[in-house]
Amino acid sequence: MSEQVVTCRVLLVEDIESEAALVAKNLRRVSGWRFLIEHFDRLTPGVERARHARYDVVLLDLNLPDGAGIEVCQRMHAAAPHTPIIVLTNQNSPELGLKALREGAQDYLIKREVDGPLLGRAIRYAIERHRGEQALRASEQRYALAVSGANDGIWDWNVRDGTAYYSARWKAILGYAECDVSERIAEWLERIDQRDRERFDEAMSQHLEGQTGFFECEYRIVTRGGEIRWVASRGVAIRDDAGAASRMAGSMTDITRRKETETRLLHEAMHDALTGLPNRNLFIDRLDLGLRRYRRDPSKQFAVLFFDIDRFKHVNDSLGHAAGDELLLQIAGRLLACLRPGDTLARLGGDEFAVVLNDIGGATDVIYVVERLQASLAQVFEIDVHLVYTSASIGIAISSESYRRPEEMLRDADIAMYRAKGTGQATYAVFDSAMHDHAMFQHRMETDLRRALDKGELEVYYQPILAIETQCVMGFEALLRWRHPSRGLVLPDDFIGIVEDTSLVVPVGWWVLDRACRQLAKWQHLFPQTPPLSMSINVSGKLFLTDDMAKRLAALLEDHGLQPASLHLEITERVVMDHGDLVLSTLADLRELGVRLHVDDFGTGYSSLTYLQRFHYDALKIDRSFVSTMVESKDSVAIVQALISLGATLGMTVVAEGIESAEQLRRLRQMHCPAGQGFWFSKPLQQDAVSDYLRQNQNPGPVLLPATG
Ligand code: C2E
Ligand code: MG
Ligand code: MG
């Protein structure tokens, strides 16, 4: 393999012919290189040529007819600044050579001493050194450009003598012009905000001592105008052989905007947007603080109040959300006005507020404050042109050794609030251990219930509903049962409330609907009659709030091949009272679909007649409490009679619930009550017992009624 030959273009400026020939001869001896030499014996044409052509090196005699001395080198360097120059001098002028080096020459050679290898080496070094210098210059320029263009300020600190370089941007961040800042490290350190100085020094000395790979710190700094800005500094130390930092350099970034955003986000994360009050997160924080303080010093008693605004939903629904918001704002204002500066009022969401009441002497102190708060809320609120009355149900939990976590105390205040609400509006209750036991019981039931559906522990029982006149079976009411593994058969009154308060309400509701409809289809098939057997199903209000209820129900009926009119949905007055217009639109969809709507437990709610005006129902179910007292109480008789007439007038059928005796039945029959159900006919039956029951009762013979009454 032949050695690779490097081609090198040489510009030789030499007026003495023999010297030029000697140079050419020497160059020919350099192995591995091929020199293309262009020779000029005058400076001016040589310089002109150098300006336009590219050479790898210039060999330049400093003693020419049209120029001599250092000026020769200057002219050539000006014409070809990117080409390395080697100066050729006579033996008697070495100082001239040195001067030439300062003027841009790479090297100088004394003509007499030059031989082939020496000249070759000189040319090679000159080219390489020149290339290195060019690269260094380019990188320095790049660095300078980056520094001047960067958003970051640059600092470079001589740790040994305390001097420092700061870039223009570094100074600009602090509001200074280029010349305003001296080159001392103190210029920086003295401006650091006192609150952060210790942290800064700590991070710095850790790095200087070699404990951290780099120095990094976010801190506040005071600008020229006295303003405070947030900056982040990073840096690395250069160390001597002993490991001691001799120099350290790095950057400084203005992070004020980011810090402001962070602070704002933190505030937002901790506060309620509407009222600006602390939210649940911050409240829990404060509560935690209170608990810690109390644990250190049990004389520092405090209480948590949990508020729920009575009838808030009503205001929101009837006057609109803007009015609802305004009411909440005014409530927040009134509550704040009743509290002391050390207390914390928070909005936990919706119409729920909570208070940490600090430094209380005992329960009586708290009750005093609570009564003051309630009195303040009892004053009328003016919302736009409306006068609004409201009140709060308040639950109270008082600090005790047993509270480990803030959430526990808030939970107990919440439980007490529910207890208060259950006893009426504008009331309060102090949490006690019986409430705790009850809540624990509820909690266990809830956990068990969540498994009950999957484990097949839920069952539907069916109670026959009969025509009172003929005693023919018209249909059934589906009644939910829970076969609990340890408690046995649990009746709905003991668990339906839990179902309704949890997310279980929807799946359980649909499970019952599906189950009962499937059975009805079977029984209609086995026991055909006119009109076909019906199924009454109790439906929770929450189900009416799902917007696709009617659609889903239509699909269900179709799946089971049922006429919509066979399905009777039982709704209590409460459902419409609690959810208002939202429910009414679903009811209208259901009516459109053709299912029947029955009012359950009629007469036990508060505004029964208004309620009937708002929507047309197909049937009224007279509550058991009236039927069961009919024999002893004239009033009950009158009410039952009135309800039956009311039904007839409004075009509704009437079903009497809870018929337990022949006498009750006889009276209802006298009053022409169309339908009824009760233990006298049958208790709710297990699914498998229904067919037998229907077989025995489908075509009853003449009805025997007791003659007395
Ligand atoms: P309700 O809809 O008023 O059902 C009638 C209740 O009276 C049933 O109680 C039934 O067993 C009982 N009952 C019927 N005849 C007599 C009688 O002659 N004497 C006596 N003392 N009681 C009689 P149950 O099954 O305990 O249900 C209680 C309530 O639970 C129901 O009252 C209903 O509101 C609710 N419920 C039952 N099943 C469901 C369901 O699947 N979903 C929903 N949301 N609620 C249900
Ligand atoms: Mg019912
Ligand atoms: Mg009922």
Image (cartoon, rainbow, N blue to C red):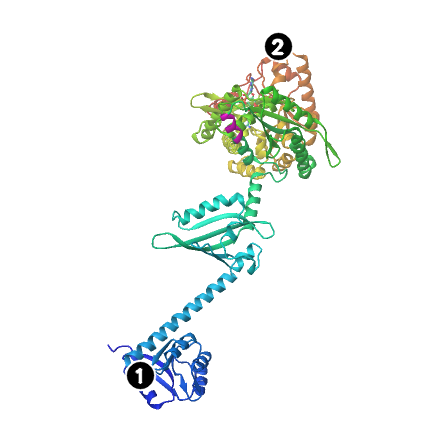
Where is residue 533? Give x, y as percent: 55, 28
Give the quarter of the figure containing the C terminus. Answer: top right
Q: Earlier in the sequence, mark 1 or mark 2?
A: 1
Q: Residue 579, relative to residue 635: is it above or below?
A: below
Question: What is the x, y in percent for residue 264?
Answer: 57, 44
Callout 2: SS? loop
Q: Is residue 355 left or right of residue 1?
A: right
| In this rendering, the label closer to the viewer, 1 or 2 | 1
Name which residue type carries label 1: Arg
State which image quarter holds ligand 3: top right
Pointer 2: what residue? 707
Q: Which residue is mark 1?
A: 112
Q: Nearer the viewer, residue 448 or 316?
A: 316
Residue 291 painted magenta: yes
Horizontally, residue 30 falls left or right of residue 264, namely left
State the extent of the magenta-drawn residues as a range.
289-296
Q: Could you tell me residue 243's position as x and y percent?
A: 35, 52
> Which one is nearer the viewer's eye here, 240 or 129?
240
Q: The residue tagged with tag 1: helix, strand or loop?
A: helix
Q: Is residue 405 part of the magenta span, yes or no?
A: no
